Image (spheres, rainbow, N blue to C red):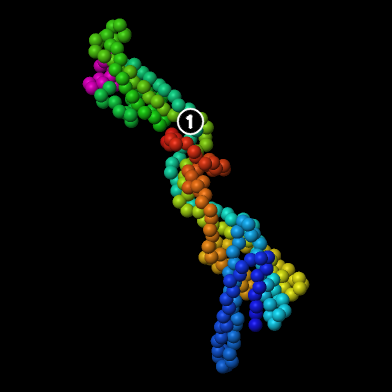
Amino acid sequence: MVVTNGCRNIDVLHQQATICAFAPNGSKQCMLEAMEVFKLNSFKKTACIRLFYNETLIKELQFQWKQLRLTCVQEDLLFTRNTVQKVIDSKRCAHSGSCVEQKCASINASTILPELEQGNGYPGITRCVESCGGPGCGCFYLSSGCLFYRIFNVPADEKIYKIFKCYQWNENFHVEFTSITGYGQRIKKKVLSLKPTIPFRMDNMMITLNTVTMPPTPELSSTFITDGSEIAIWRHGNSPTLI
C-alpha cells in the first residue's frame, strides 16, 4: 500500500483508488491511482510530498513556486500620436471666397475651407466668427466679413501609440518541480508552466493547477498606452487626440 505524507508543514488532501481491468487472456490487472491536493502561495512557496510503500520511502516530490505571470488579452480603444497643436486663420470680406450667402452660419467643425488648406490634412476643428467689414477693414462691402480659423494637430514624430484595456488576464503559473527517488539516488528537476484547469502530463503523473486566488489588484483594470515596445498606465482623464 502506498502512503503519502506532506512535508515542510503543509496540509495535503490525499485520495487514492484502485482501478482494475481484465486482459483478453482473462488475467486481472490493477493500478493504484493516488491524488494529492495542496496549496502554494507567496508565503509558503515550497511544498513536498513523500510517497511510502511498505514504510519505505520510494519517492519525494518537491514543488517550488517561481512566479505567477499574467498575460493581457487586449481590447483596443484607440490609436493616437504625439502631436503639436497649431492654428491657422484667414480673413475674408463679404461676398469673397467662402464668406458668401449665410457666411459663418454655414460653417461647422468639420467644414473644409480652401482658405485653411494648410490645416485641412490634419485632424482638427474649423470655426468661423464674424469680423468687421467696409472700407475701414479693407473691404468693399459694408456687410460684416468672416474670420475663419482651424485648430489642428501635427504629428511630432513617427511613433503610433495604442491605448487599450485588458478585458481578461490569462494566468500562467511557473513551478519548479523536483523528483527524488530512493534515498537521493536520482534527482530530476524541471520548471513547469501550468495554466488553470489544464492538466500537465509528466512521466506517470498528471499535474493540474485547479484554481488561482489573487488579492484585489486595481491596476489590472487600468487603461494602458504602448508604442509597441514600452507600456505604461494611462492615468489622464481626457482622451488623447485622434490622429
From this viewpoint, is residue 97 visible? no
Taking the magenta stretch, the answer to whether it contains residue 95 is: yes
Task: Say which quadrant the N terminus sits in.
Answer: bottom right
Residue 65 spot, x, y in % from top left = 63, 59
Relative depth, front residue between 59 and 190: 59
Report which quarter residue 242 is drawn in: top left
Q: Report the front residue among 45 and 10.
A: 10
- Answer above or below: position of 3 versus 226: below
Residue flagged by tag 1: what amino acid is it? Thr
Q: Residue at x 66, y 62 (%)?
A: 46
Residue situated furthest left in the rendering: 101
Can residue 78 be seen here? The reply is: yes
Give the residues drawn in magenta, as a range: 93-103
Give residue 187's position: percent from left, percent from top.
73, 68
Q: Quadrant of the C terminus?
A: top left
Residue 80 part of the magenta segment: no
Query: Dot 1, crowdedness within 10 Å: few (<14), some or many (≥20)?
Result: some
The residue at 26%/14% (across/down) is 144
**Residue 205 falls in which quadrant of the image?**
bottom right
As drawn, 26 above or below 39: below
From this view, report whether residue 158 is shown above or below residue 59.
above
Secondary element at tag 1 = strand
Judging depth in this view, the residue of 117 and 219 nearest the camera is: 219
Q: Is residue 60 left or right of residue 108?
A: right
Residue named by callout 1: 83
Q: Residue furthest bottom?
A: 26
The residue located at (55%, 43%) in the rendering is 231
Determine the main secondary structure of the stretch shown in magenta: loop
Q: Is residue 76 left or right of residue 211?
A: left
Spot the residue most to the top: 136
